[in-house]
Image (cartoon, coloured by chain):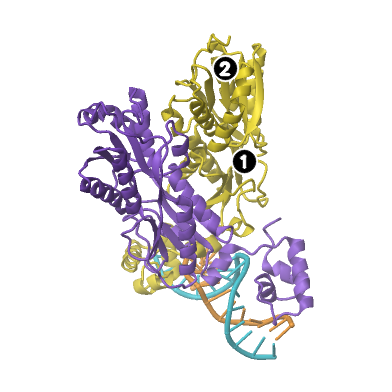
Chain colours: A yellow, B purple, C cyan, D orange
DNA sequence: CTGTTAGCGCTTTCAG
DNA sequence: CTGAAAGCGCTAACAG
């Protein structure tokens, strides 16, 4: 029976009209309904276990109290952390509908589900079309027009570059993500600039954001890298770098003895890898939280402010060290 | 203007009634609406970019075309994989609302959002109350009443036990998950039984499902374990075992030289760890997919069948080996 | 202070 | 073959 009682049932039980029920249930009874009546309504609500049908409310008010998160690969702990941040910000005040993408396609976000949500959190740069008029907040997409939350990846890239430079590295290989997203372009550009400005050499290779793919790439390319005198490899994401580490370990290459490893994200696994990864920490949880808050303001009619850029920091751990003098 | 057109707009443009529009849009026009009229309606739909408001449809039909997934810690790649499986099964035909839990609380699933979905996928054993009448499918909860999809964790535990026994291990430490969930009880019980039956000794310790927590525990307990003559440690989940591996690596303990490591799940990281983890593979993606399919049938009025149990398999990799003879 | 009433946008009988 | 009309359950003017 739970969940079945309707407002009219409550009204009948309390001897009032549905309008009155609606007012007290929505806390809009102040100065409109007498205390005594309110009490009677509340009692009826409790007895019947009444809960307003959210679908009907949505139709009547135009507010569904739910937002969508369009993302790619929730299997990447980084994305999962973003989702956790979003969920934390929502805290039960709204529900989260997840639209995940498969392969290289944009997330499955049908127009039907679009008509259900109040706004969308877009973590899929470039792709997905969202009906104009729907509030949208872009995540980790610095080039996106309109409101968004992103990271200062360039500052992070430069810090990582300087760290490598200070250690004495002069030949680094950058593993870019095989996706044309602004966040990745910026990581690469900033890292490359900082490194080349100091006279170091950086070559880029593209690699899918996948443990095994990065691992295979490393197995296939290591000989080449070594002959090139590469002393440090930087991945665009921890996932890739962890894959590289796996390949290197399998090949018996010492890290950071023979090669240093650096990357971006700081997912939980980065800290427990052997060796633990030196990485640019991008606060994923906060990204999700802030984005959800921003979207909430937008939905409530707030002004459409621009991008909020979150500060990042370099976390130096064990995967970076001085380059082997044997190769100097 | 996109997303704003209503059925009445389409009706006006096509010179028909909203009823007719509804019929052709929903593919129920066969034998009710002439081909010519249908064509006119379709043209109007295309010109106006009409998409039915899902909320209104939901109110009218009682079907929201969306289901909820109540889960804990999407940050665990295992859970993320389950979600991916669910999303794959839905394939845009329904939307997925995510209810995540924070800490030890049941997932945030308010009655309001409950009234929005057609059914729920429950991946939170024991806890969450879902209104009776709402179709529910339990995930990875073998003791759950009613429909569900779970793993044959006992067979997996026994296979792992035999593998350890064959290698020569006689003293193992089991790191149970600090959650009173049936799936974990079964893993522990089956492993313990199989091991003790062969005369081996197993001691259990409880540990949160968290990389750092497992790592700290290992750092604190290793001396004790070693003095006890432990030659193998089995974690209830890969996350825990990966944490143990991290602690052991930090302590300079060789794996599998000094201790062998085994666990359950087979998340992607298990395969790239150094050494790669020997683990009982629980097909998470399939769990999600099957559960979503089952829920779909239930929602469509199908019979409530019992638990579907998915077969599991032991994946032997590098973290297990013969126990050190020095400790024999 | 409280009830009546007109929608929200769509589906679906029921007449015609 | 097509349209009028009655809801789905709730909200929010507007009267009283």
Instruction: Report the side of B326 relative to B41 (left or right).
Output: left
**Disc 1 target residue:** A304
Mark seen at residue B204:
none
Is disc 1 placed on a helix, strand or loop?
loop
**Disc 2 target residue:** A231
Q: Is residue A32 visible?
A: no
Instruction: Report the side of B189 relative to A76 (left or right).
Output: left
Which is nearer the eye, A180 or A235?
A: A235
Instruction: Specify the quadrant that holds the N terminus of chain B.
Output: bottom right
Q: Chain of mark 2?
A: A
- For the point 67% across and 38% down, which residue is it? A145
Which is nearer the eye, B325 or A35?
A: B325
Q: Are marks 2 and 1 in contact (CB under 8 Å)?
A: no
Residue B253, quarter of the rendered image: top left
Badge count = 2
Q: Is residue B126 above or below residue B319?
A: below
Q: Position of residue B60 (x, y in %)?
A: 55, 71
Of the two numbered discs 2 and 1 on the same chain, state the one appearing first in sequence.
Answer: 2
- Mark nearest the camera among 2 and 1 is 2
Q: Position of residue A307 (x, y in %)?
A: 61, 34
Instruction: Specify the quadrant that holds the C terminus of chain B.
Output: top left
Q: Position of residue B166 (x, y in %)?
A: 31, 42
- For the point 52% across and 34% down, which residue is it? A239
Q: Are marks 2 and 1 on the same chain?
A: yes
Q: Is residue A281 above or below residue A53?
A: above
Q: Chain of mark 1?
A: A
């Amino acid at each position: 029976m739970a969940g079945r009682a309707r407002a009219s049932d409550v009204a009948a039980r309390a001897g009032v009209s549905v309008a009155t029920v609606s007012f007290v249930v929505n806390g809009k009874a102040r100065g409109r309904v007498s205390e005594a009546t309110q009490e009677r309504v509340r009692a009826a609500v409790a007895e019947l276990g009444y809960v307003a049908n959210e679908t009907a409310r949505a139709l009547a008010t135009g507010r569904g109290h739910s937002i969508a998160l369009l993302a790619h690969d929730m299997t990447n702990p980084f994305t999962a952390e973003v989702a956790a941040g979003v969920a934390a910000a929502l805290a039960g005040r709204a529900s989260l509908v997840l639209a995940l993408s498969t392969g290289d396609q944009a997330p499955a976000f049908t127009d039907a589900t679009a008509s259900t949500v109040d706004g969308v959190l877009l973590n899929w740069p470039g792709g997905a079309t969202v009906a104009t008029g729907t509030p949208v907040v872009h995540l980790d997409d610095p080039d996106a027009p309109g409101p968004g939350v992103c990271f200062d990846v360039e500052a992070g890239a430069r810090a990582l570059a300087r760290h490598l430079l200070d250690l004495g590295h002069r030949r680094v290989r950058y593993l870019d993500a095989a996706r044309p997203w602004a966040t990745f372009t910026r990581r690469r550009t900033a890292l490359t600039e900082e490194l080349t400005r100091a006279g170091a050499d950086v070559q880029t290779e593209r690699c899918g954001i996948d443990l095994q793919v990065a691992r295979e790439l490393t197995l296939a390319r290591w000989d080449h890298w070594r002959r090139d005198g590469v002393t440090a490899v930087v991945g665009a994401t921890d996932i890739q770098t962890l894959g590289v580490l796996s390949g290197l370990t399998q090949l018996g290459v010492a890290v950071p003895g023979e090669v240093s490893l650096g990357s971006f994200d700081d997912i939980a696994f980065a800290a427990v890898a052997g060796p633990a990864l030196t990485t640019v920490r991008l606060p994923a949880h906060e990204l999700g939280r802030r984005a959800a808050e921003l979207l909430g303001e937008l939905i409530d009619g707030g002004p459409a402010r621009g991008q909020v850029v979150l500060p990042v920091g370099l976390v130096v751990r064990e995967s970076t060290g001085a380059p082997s003098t044997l190769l100097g």
